[in-house]
Image (tube, coloured by chain):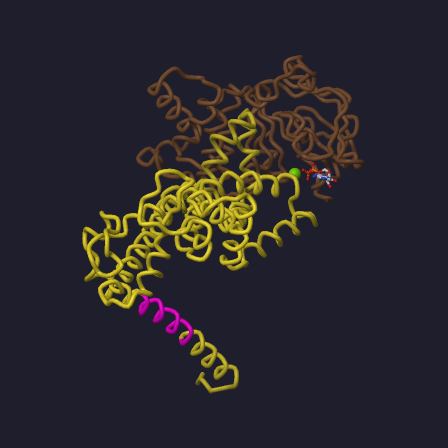
């Protein structure tokens, strides 16, 4: 039978072309971003960039590095993720065990999805107002709390999905062998859910470490590595922002080097989480 | 008859639906008892009362007694995990634990602390995999995930896993209904081999399987036990008209 070019074939070809075009646009942008960051940042990426804090005149092109921002970002995102984890796991468990698919459960999920969509500058401004009310200055603690708020809905929803995908048969299989609830929770359910939970944690960490707006008012910026959680803390996104705003080419190059460092960290986290999740999920029951 | 399980005046309810009506039966020790009957007649419900699984479903209730070796498993001070250790279950679809093949078999022995050292566990795992007829197929890949096995192999793994906690009774709820014919035959063969050591209770909806396996038969209809007795008698010479109708394929 010969193929005739009917309307449906034309539509199919057209839609396919649209899809391919969209894909090229997105993949191309991603490639272009990576290329810009690498080509401009790599030449300025020296050992002293990652091993030193800014010295006098660093923002004029003199020596130093952004160790303050690297450490600051790890502290901020690490602390934020830890706090978000402490709250999101109980919330997700509560959602699953007590609310389920009930109307109230749906409202809680809707609320979390709305929180997910709120721009981070709003979190930053909110955190700032709260800190003012308590008479606190910009500090590592403030930044950690702001990031925890941003990460909370992401992590909670991700864990909610993980728990919802938990097969009911699994519990029965373990009960049939005479397991106690505690044994099921610690030896069976964790094995089943760990890959999803690790992914949720690292997803939230990635979001937290890349955020500039939330930490701008709450964590401030400093050239020193914070010695306590009440001192201000620098962060990589803000390091990029401030250096890019300087009128000196050397400093601007360092902004790209900082962006490259941030990109590498985020990339390492997402590849690492895929690797870990892949290894752990070998055993997971579908 | 040497009864291993005795059921007395047993009624079971899902909320206000009565699924079992005044069941009074005895199941013989170290034989295969087959529970048969049309779909929805309460076979699964009856089986679930033997290992206290019915209470896992919300709003269920039970009156009456289920005695294992004369001990009512619904008495107040009974340790339910101990009941489930003594009464193993082979489910309708195999459901391995999210672990390796080895760990699946070792899991139950670990939680009940049944062995003293690694070597004993290793030997026991091998033994039960052999009993389930799976060892030769998996001996080179014991650390692989259980999910890497075929459905039929998974069901044999579940059998090994259940046997490893040393039950006296094995329950099977249509344990071959999800399997291909060859795997089903495999499982049936294992069950026949195990009846020297275990009391086995199998639910089946196929009459042919019932005839292949049964030493003792329970025929149920609409929540009631219509007839029970040695397989030969029930199959060749049913006392009840409803049993005869079922056996002649009028369902
Ligand atoms: N979870 C449940 N909730 C309400 N009714 C149920 C439930 N499970 C079974 N039933 C009812 O109990 C009766 C017996 O069911 P079941 O024991 O599963 O039958 P069988 O295994 O013989 O097919 C059926 O009428 C069924 O509708
Ligand atoms: Mg059934």
Query: Residue B251: which quarter of the image?
Result: top right
Magenta region, main secondary structure: helix
**Residue at x-position 52% and y-position 55%:** A125
Task: Provide the residue span drawn in magenta.
Answer: A21-33
Tell me which image quadrant ligand 2 sits in.
top right
Residue A65 appears in the figure: yes
User: As rendered, which of A206 and A188 lies closer to the eye?
Assistant: A206
Query: Residue B207: which quarter of the image?
Result: top right
Question: Is A182 rendered above or below residue A201?
Answer: above
Position in image of residue A128 (x %, y %): 51, 51
User: As rendered, which of B140 and A219 lies closer to the eye?
Assistant: A219
Left or right relative to B238: residue A121: left
Residue B148 appears in the figure: no
Query: Residue A257: which quarter of the image?
Result: bottom left
Question: Is A16 rendered above or below residue B250?
Answer: below
Position in image of residue B164 (x %, y %): 46, 24
The hue used for chain A is yellow
**Residue at x-position 69% and y-position 48%:** A104
Left or right relative to B165: residue B62: right
Of the 4 image quadrants, the one containing the N terminus of chain B is top right
Position in image of residue A100 (x %, y %): 64, 44
User: As rendered, which of A34 and B81 lies closer to the eye?
Assistant: A34
**Does the segment drawn in magenta span residue A28?**
yes
Chain painted brown: B
Number of residue marks: 0
**Does the segment drawn in magenta span residue B185?**
no
User: As rendered, which of A154 and A234 lies closer to the eye?
Assistant: A234
Question: Is A45 rendered above or below residue B128?
Answer: below
**Residue at x-position 53% and y-position 48%:** A132
């Amino acid at each position: 039978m010969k193929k005739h070019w009917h309307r449906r074939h034309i539509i199919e070809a057209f839609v396919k072309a649209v899809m391919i075009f969209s894909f090229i646009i997105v993949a191309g942008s991603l490639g272009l971003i990576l290329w810009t960051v690498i080509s401009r940042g790599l030449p300025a990426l020296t050992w002293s960039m990652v091993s030193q804090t800014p010295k006098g005149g660093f923002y004029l092109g003199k020596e130093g590095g952004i160790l303050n921002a690297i450490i600051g970002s790890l502290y901020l995102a690490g602390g934020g993720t830890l706090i978000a984890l402490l709250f999101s796991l109980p919330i997700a468990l509560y959602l699953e065990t007590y609310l389920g698919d009930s109307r109230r459960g749906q409202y809680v999920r809707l609320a979390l999805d709305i929180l997910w969509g709120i721009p981070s500058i709003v979190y930053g401004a909110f955190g700032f107002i709260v800190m003012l009310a308590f008479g606190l200055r910009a500090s590592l603690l403030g930044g950690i709390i702001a990031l925890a708020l941003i990460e909370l809905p992401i992590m909670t929803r991700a864990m909610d999905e993980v728990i919802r995908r938990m097969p009911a048969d699994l519990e029965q299989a373990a009960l049939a062998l005479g397991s106690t609830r505690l044994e099921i929770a610690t030896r069976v359910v964790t094995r089943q859910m760990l890959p999803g939970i690790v992914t949720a944690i690292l997803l939230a960490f990635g979001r937290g470490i890349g955020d500039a707006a939330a930490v701008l008012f709450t964590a401030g910026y400093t050239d020193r590595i914070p010695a306590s959680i009440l001192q201000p803390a620098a962060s990589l996104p803000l390091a990029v922002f401030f250096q890019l705003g300087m009128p000196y080419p050397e400093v601007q190059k360092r902004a790209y080097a900082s962006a490259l460092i941030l990109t590498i960290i985020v990339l390492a986290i997402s590849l690492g989480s895929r690797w870990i999740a892949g290894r752990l999920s070998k055993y997971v029951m579908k | 008859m040497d009864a291993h399980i005795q059921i007395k005046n047993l009624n079971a309810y899902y909320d206000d639906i009565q699924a079992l009506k005044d069941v009074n039966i005895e199941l013989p020790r170290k034989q295969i008892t087959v529970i048969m009957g049309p779909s929805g007649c309460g076979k699964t419900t009856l089986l679930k009362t033997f290992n206290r699984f019915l209470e896992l479903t919300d709003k269920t209730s039970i009156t009456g007694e289920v005695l294992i070796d004369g001990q009512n498993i619904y008495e107040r001070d009974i340790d339910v995990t101990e009941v489930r250790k003594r009464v193993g279950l082979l489910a309708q679809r195999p459901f391995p634990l999210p672990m390796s093949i080895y760990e699946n078999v070792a899991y139950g022995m670990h939680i009940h602390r049944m062995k003293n050292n690694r070597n004993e566990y290793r030997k026991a795992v091998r033994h039960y995999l052999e009993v389930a007829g799976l060892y030769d197929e998996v001996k080179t890949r014991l650390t692989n995930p259980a999910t890497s096995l075929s459905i039929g192999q998974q069901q044999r793994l579940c059998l090994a896993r259940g046997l490893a906690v040393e039950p006296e009774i094995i329950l099977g709820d249509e344990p071959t209904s999800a399997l291909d014919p060859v795997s089903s035959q495999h499982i049936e063969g294992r069950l026949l081999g195990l009846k020297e050591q275990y009391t086995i209770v199998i639910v089946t909806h196929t009459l042919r399987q019932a005839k292949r396996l049964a030493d003792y038969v329970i025929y149920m209809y609409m929540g009631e036990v219509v007839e029970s007795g040695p397989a030969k008698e029930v199959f060749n010479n049913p006392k009840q008209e409803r049993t005869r109708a079922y056996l002649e394929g009028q369902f």
